[in-house]
Image (tube, rainbow, N blue to C red):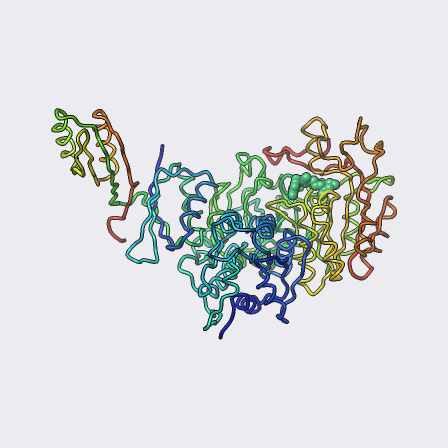
Amino acid sequence: MNTRTISVLVENHSGTLSRISGLFASRGYNISSLTVGETEDQSISRMTIVVEGDDAIIEQVVKQLNKLIDVIKVIDFEGSPVIEREFILVRVDSTKSSRHEIVELADLFGAKVAYVGASSITFELCAPCDIINDFIVLIKPYGVKELIRTGKVAMAQARK
Amino acid sequence: MKKKGAEILVDALIKEGVDVLFGYPGGQAIPIFDALYDAKELSVVLVRHEQAAAHAADGYARATGKVGVCIATSGPGATNLITGIANAYLDSIPMVAITGQVSTPYLGTDAFQEADMVGISRPVTKHNFLVKDIRELPAILKQAFYIARTGRPGPVLVDLPQDVSRAVLDDYEYPQEISMRSYKPTIVGHPRQIQKAAELIKTAERPMIYAGGGVITSGAHEELFELATKLNAPVTLTLMGLGAFPGEHELFMGMPGMHGSKTANLAFQEADLIISVGARFDDRVTGHVGSFAPKAKIIHLDIDPAAISKIVRVDIPVVGDAKNVLAALNKLVAPREPSEWNETIRKWKDGKLFSYKQSDKVIKPQYVIEQLYNLTKDSDALIATEVGQHQMWTAQYYRFARPRTFLSSGGLGTMGFGLPAAMGASLGLGRRTVVDVAGDGSIQMNIQELATIAINRIPVKVVILNNEYLGMVRQWQEMFWNKRYSSTCLRGGTLCDECKGPGHCKIAYVPDFVKLAESYSIPGFRATKPSDVADTLRQGLEIEGPALMEFAVANEENVFPMVPAGKPLDQVMEEL
Ligand SMILES: Cc1ncc(C[n+]2csc(CCOP(=O)(O)OP(=O)(O)O)c2C)c(N)n1
Ligand SMILES: [Mg+2]
């Protein structure tokens, strides 16, 4: 599935999130992930949305988002260099014998141990999404008990 | 200045230039209506159903170009507005709807007559507000009117909890200026895009203009006329655009699309350039999108960037206000002599855009419209319609000459729109005569407004084309569903046994519209023969104040031409 990352600066009101999610729902656009939080200006929130769809759909998504009154700016990252990160917490089965191997693997990805239990280890990892995906693939065979992804956040590398 | 919330609302309405508004009270709206009671500057029209308040505000806005205002109470009053708000949304009509709401401590508790209006109205408003604090109220009202009337206009809902309308603000002042960082509609078209459009126009051999409601909204009809006559480009107008170009002009091709003229539809298929102005390539216009305008390059002027390339890929988009952009474009284009293309159009048109078979036995609905046109074209009367066959016949046979003279529900296709819209329009224009061309089905959807019209002596003339059917649906059933008239006969009911069709039915038509009018103390007239049509119209139109005229028309007349849904525009059916 073709996906595209866009960033949306919105007025930090109650109700803004429902306008955005409502737009996606009523026009049938699919969201892979959506994150939201305050920015350097407290009155503005920034959403990073990963949308599924071809160029024509993305073009409409961007235009329809721009049309919402609470949307201040829509940034389509297509074709420009970005810094992107996602954060995960993952709890993996571990026995005495596998522990060492798992930690070694996590280390290769730069994942940190967040908690060690009797029969599991919880890792935290903040990295670009494709690295996160690779990590999940490799850690899966050990038995993933629980996995949480925050969704991607992205920022252009430098201002034009 | 010290003011209560409801008083702030009234002050804002006056400052925004509202002179008439339409409303219906209830518990949570009592403080608002109480404040309105003393407002000498504006008159409040008590409708008989909230849906009508919204349509009346809509009709007021269409006729005057100003923002229409309606007010309802919380819960059922507010939800009753929704159809009218959705109608205004789809036709881009500026409106502010004020709804009473339960007091803020009760919000979200399923309190008596609580409905989540911000949630319910979100998909059918341009924007909406819930006022939780009286300190926000002045700015919200200012923004509501600003958003409603600028850019691509639309309805804005302001939900006002009762405690906020009763709270007091010590230092009230209505904002003079407004600037919103998140909302800055583009007005002026990009000069380079306009230049490109002008260059493309220069090379076109078979140009045509396709214009819609945006021309009327922006008041660009004179600029449109200049462009069309300068280029000798034939013009087609959407249902929403009718009146933006003179209906009797030789360059006029009528409405396009499903029930449009053959001339306009063939022109789309043969043109090498389509200049689209304030129209949105609705599926009722394009027919099968893949086969639409195969030979044409498209220039699309629209104030809404999101309308561009939504349905049809365009070659040169220009975002901006139609009046502004057309004025700039007119300066760049050179006159074009009439060509073979104009000759082709003239041949297709052959002196008329639409035709029907006249009868001397039964009244043909098209004939009523033609007569209505003859009798009113030299007056300043407006025409509203309901939705159905009668609406299409009006669009086809009434040759609108001026903008804001045709009020019809385009995008939502709302039966019941015409009567309240006519009354709103009339009051907006200082009691101008407005004719509502109605079907016998549609008129019953907001018939209660005859009371509002009668009591306020509003000169609305109701013309009912009574075909005893939900005719438009019946037509589809006849053409595409083996003539199975399921739930479309307005005589039909559980008492019917074997149906032998119209003319053989022994069940009386209900209601008797003439008697019904009389019960509202509105004079009623009825015509049953073609020879009575003109006289009946004359009687109803000449009488002072409201009137109702019923025409017993051919039951199974169909609207032609017709391009069946989803078919290419050159697959026109002209009869069965
Ligand atoms: C509120 C609403 N309900 C249903 C429809 C579907 N509909 C479209 S036209 C039509 C028939 C209208 O009948 P009438 O008013 O008698 O007009 P006619 O077509 O007979 O001229 C119906 C039911 C609609 N457009 N609006
Ligand atoms: Mg009918």
Residue A108: give x, y in percent of width and height: 14, 33
Above or below: residue B376 compared with residue B38: above
Nearest the viewer among B156 and B338 is: B156
Q: Between B235 and B468, which is closer to the camera in this rendering? A: B468
Residue B42, percent from left and from top: 63, 68
Q: Quadrant of residue B25?
A: bottom right
Q: Measured along the vertical axis of the image, is residue A52 above or below residue B79?
A: above
- Residue lying furthest bottom: B1
Task: Find ligand 1 in the image and state its quadrant.
Answer: top right
Q: Depth check: B485 or B279 in front?
A: B485
Q: Give coordinates of residue B70: x percent, y percent.
A: 60, 58
Q: How many marks?
A: 0
Residue B209 in sight here:
no
Picture quarter with the N terminus of chain A: top left
Residue at point 21% right, 32% down?
A135
Q: Is residue B102 visible?
A: yes
Query: Closer to the camera, B485 or A140?
Result: A140
State the image coordinates of residue B534 (x, y, percent, origin top left).
84, 51
Indicate the quadrant where residue A2 lies.
top left
Q: Quadrant of residue B576?
A: top right
